[in-house]
Image (tube, coloured by chain):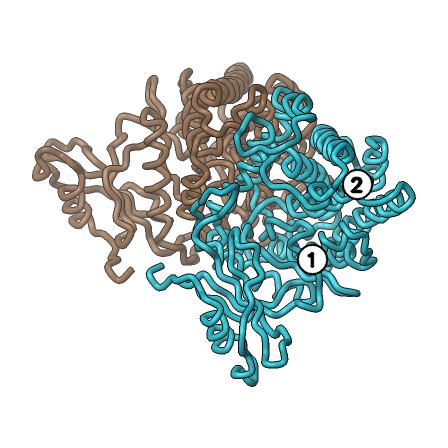
Chain colours: A brown, B cyan
Amino acid sequence: MSQYRTFTAADAVAYAQQFGGLAKPAALVNAQEVGDGNLNLVFKIFDSEGVSRIVVKQALPYVRCVGESWPLTLDRARLEAQTLVEHYKHSPEHTVNILHYDPELAAMVMEDLSSHRIWRGELVSGVYYPQAATQLGEYLARTLFHTSDFFLHPHDKKAQVARFINPEMCEITEDLFFNDPFTDHERNSYPAELAERVVALRNDDALKIAVASLKHRFFSSAEALLHGDIHSGSIFVAEGSLKAIDAEFGYFGPIGFDIGTAIGNLLLNYCAQPGHFGPRDAAAHREQRLQDIRELWLTFAERFTALARTKTRDVALGYPGYVERFLKHVWQDAIGYCGTELVRRTVGMSHVADLDTIEEHETRIACIGHAIELGKFLIVIADQIDNVDQFIARVRQKG
Amino acid sequence: MSQYRTFTAADAVAYAQQFGGLAKPAALVNAQEVGDGNLNLVFKIFDSEGVSRIVVKQALPYVRCVGESWPLTLDRARLEAQTLVEHYKHSPEHTVNILHYDPELAAMVMEDLSSHRIWRGELVSGVYYPQAATQLGEYLARTLFHTSDFFLHPHDKKAQVARFINPEMCEITEDLFFNDPFTDHERNSYPAELAERVVALRNDDALKIAVASLKHRFFSSAEALLHGDIHSGSIFVAEGSLKAIDAEFGYFGPIGFDIGTAIGNLLLNYCAQPGHFGPRDAAAHREQRLQDIRELWLTFAERFTALARTKTRDVALGYPGYVERFLKHVWQDAIGYCGTELVRRTVGMSHVADLDTIEEHETRIACIGHAIELGKFLIVIADQIDNVDQFIARVRQKG
C-alpha cells in the first residue's frame, strides 16, 4: 500500500480525467467532497458548466466514529469495486457502473448519479417511488442467482468465494448485528427509557439461540455474492430507476441476509411513520411499506425461480421443485436477518435517519421500542411464517 | 510443477532418508510399492532387518480407472497433507502423523502403520474392534470442532477456507455422490437385476429434491475442515487404536458429510453380512454395526458438546443451548449424506469390498438391493429421525 495517499480535490479531478472514460477529459475542472467523511472520501467531479459528470470515491484507512479512530482495511475498496463490477454484469440497470478502480490507491471512478436521490431520505420525506421495491427485488434476484451454485460452475464459484473473502468488513457485521445488541456492550446506543426491554434481550433463550444460528450461517453459508449492506441508504432512486451502491461488505454469504437487510429497512421506515406524519398519512405510508415488502419478496422469488428454470447449470439443483424448496429456506433466513437489522439499528451502534430524525421525544422512544419488539418477535418466530402475506399479518399484529 | 517426477523405489528410499526424521537414516535400505496404483504411489520403506519404518506417498497426475486415464490435480497431495497436519493438531491419537510434504513433488512422508490394518478388511472378515467406533466419534468431534466457527477466530477461519478450497476433488464427490447414481450415467455400475429400482431413483421427486438440497449444502456450507472421504477404507485400526489416513478430499464443508460417510460405511457392512456369514453370525455382526453407529454418534455429539461448553470462542455461538440446536441440524444432514453414501457405493462407480466380495450371486444382488433401498429411504426421511435410537429402529424396519 506504499502508493496510497489521501486525495485532494485536485487529485480527484486528475484521477477522473485519466480514468473517467470521457471523450473530453479536460472538460472536468473541479471537485466537491460530498461524503460524510467517516469511512470514505467521495468527490463529485464537475465540468466548467457546473454539471456533475463523474464520481471519485476513495477509502480512508480508518473509520471516524464517536470521536475515535478505528483502523479499517483499504482492501475494502477492492472488494466494493469488484462486488459492484460483478453485480453490474448481472444487473446493469440496478447497479452503479464502476469505470475504474485501483487497489493501491483504494480508489474508484464511477458513474455520476446526481439525477438520483438516496432512497432512505425519500422514504423519510414520504416521497413514494412505486417501482423501487420491484426493482430492488429484480436486482437481488439477478445478482444472487448468477453468483450462486445454481448458475456458476463449481470451480468458478470456489475461486470467487476465495476472491471475495472479506474478514474485516464481515467482522463488523458479525459484531454489530449478532453480538453487541444482545449483550452489554459500550458500542450500544439506545434511549434510557428502553433499557429494561434492551436488557431483556440478553437472557431470552429462544432469541439468543436463534441469533446464534443466524450468525453461524452468516459465518459459514456461502450461497451467493451478497451486497452485504443493502439498506435504503445504499440505494439511489429516481423516477423509474434504482441503483445499488456502496458494496464494501460484499462477500459470499446466505442469500437471506441481503433480502432480510432490505426488508428490515423498509420495516424501520414503517415503524418510524408516526414520528414524521399525522395519523392518516402515517397509515398510508405504512401500507405502502408493507406493499413494498410484498413486491420486493414476490419479485425476487418469481425472478429467481424463472432464472433457475431457464439458466440453472447444475443438473442436481435444476431438478423441478428444488428451487421452490430452496427459496423457502431463503425466506425463513430473510425473516430472521430482517429481525436482526431492526434490533441492531435501534439498540446497537449504527442507527437510521428514519428513527433518529423524529423530533418529538416520546414518539421517537415509542417508534424505537416498536422496532425492537418487532425485530425480536420476527427472529423468534421466523420459521413459523410461511409466506409474505403471513409476514404482513404478523407485522400488523405487532402494531 | 516442473520439479515433478514419478518416484522409483530408490527415490522413495532417498526421500525417506532425507525427510523421515529418523536418527539413523542410513538404516533405511529398500522400498516396496503397496498402493493400488490407481491414484497414488505408496512406498513402505524398510530397514536392513526388513522392518517397515516409514511410508512415502506420492500423488500420480491421473486416475487409472476402468482402463481410462483421468487427469487429476497434483495439488491434492498438498490438500491431503495439510488436512492431516491440521487434524493431527487436534486429534494426534487418531490421525496419521505427516512428517514432511513437498507440493512440487506431490509427495509426503508419514508414520508407518504396519501394526494396524484397514478397518474395512477387518469388518468384512468379521474381526471386531470394540473401541473403533468410539475413537472415530472422538476423532470427528475433535477435528471438526476445532476447525469450526465455534473455535476458530473468524479471520483464521476465512483464511483456512481459502487455503482448503479443493475444486477438483470436490467435483468428484459432487458428481459421484449427487449426480451419477440419480441419472443415467455411463460411470454407474450396478447389477442388471436391479436396473428397475435404479431407474426408479431418477424420477422420485422427494428423493431428487432431498439430494439437490444435500448437494447444495456440500457446495455452500463451510462448517468445518472435513476429512472428506472418511469411509472404513480410510481408517487404520489395531487393538485400542484408530488412525485416519487419505484426506485428499479435505475441504471446508458440512459437518454432517463426514459423519454420514462414516455411518454409511458401517451400514454398507451391515447390509453385506448375509453374504459373508451364516445367519447367527451375520445377525450378531449386524447388531455390532448398529451399536457401532450408536457409539459413533453419541461419542461425537457428547465430545463436540463438551468441547463447545469449554472452548467455544465465539460469544454468540457459545450461548447455552445453541450447540445442541446445531447438532440436531448436523444429525439430520448426517442421515441424508449417509443415504447418499449407500446409493453411490451400490449404483455409482465406486464400490465397497463389503458388497463386491460376496461370492454367492443372488445374495450379493439381495444385499446390494437392500443397501439401495435403505439409502433412498434414509435420504427421504432424514428430517423425521430425531435421534440415533430412532435411526436404528428405522434401519431394522428396512430389514
Most extreme residue toward the front is B360
> Nearer the observer, disc 1 or disc 2?
2
Q: In this view, does A339 lie above or below B50?
A: above
Dots 1 and 2 on the same chain: yes
Disc 1 residue crowd, few under 14, some 14–19, many 20+, Cα 10 Å = many
- Decide if residue A192 is on the left or right side of residue B64: right
The image position of residue B252, as x and y in percent, is 55, 49
Q: Label 1: which residue?
A: B118
User: Disc 1 sits on a residue from what chain?
Assistant: B
SS at mark 2 in the image: helix
Identify the subunit bearing mark 2: B
Q: Quadrant of the C terminus of chain B?
A: top right
Left or right, B126 with respect to A36, comes to: right
Secondary structure type for disc 1 = strand
Count all numbered tags in the image, as a single digit: 2
The label number, if any, that marks residue B275 in the structure image: 2
Q: Where is residue B287 in the image (x, y as percent from the top left)?
A: 87, 45
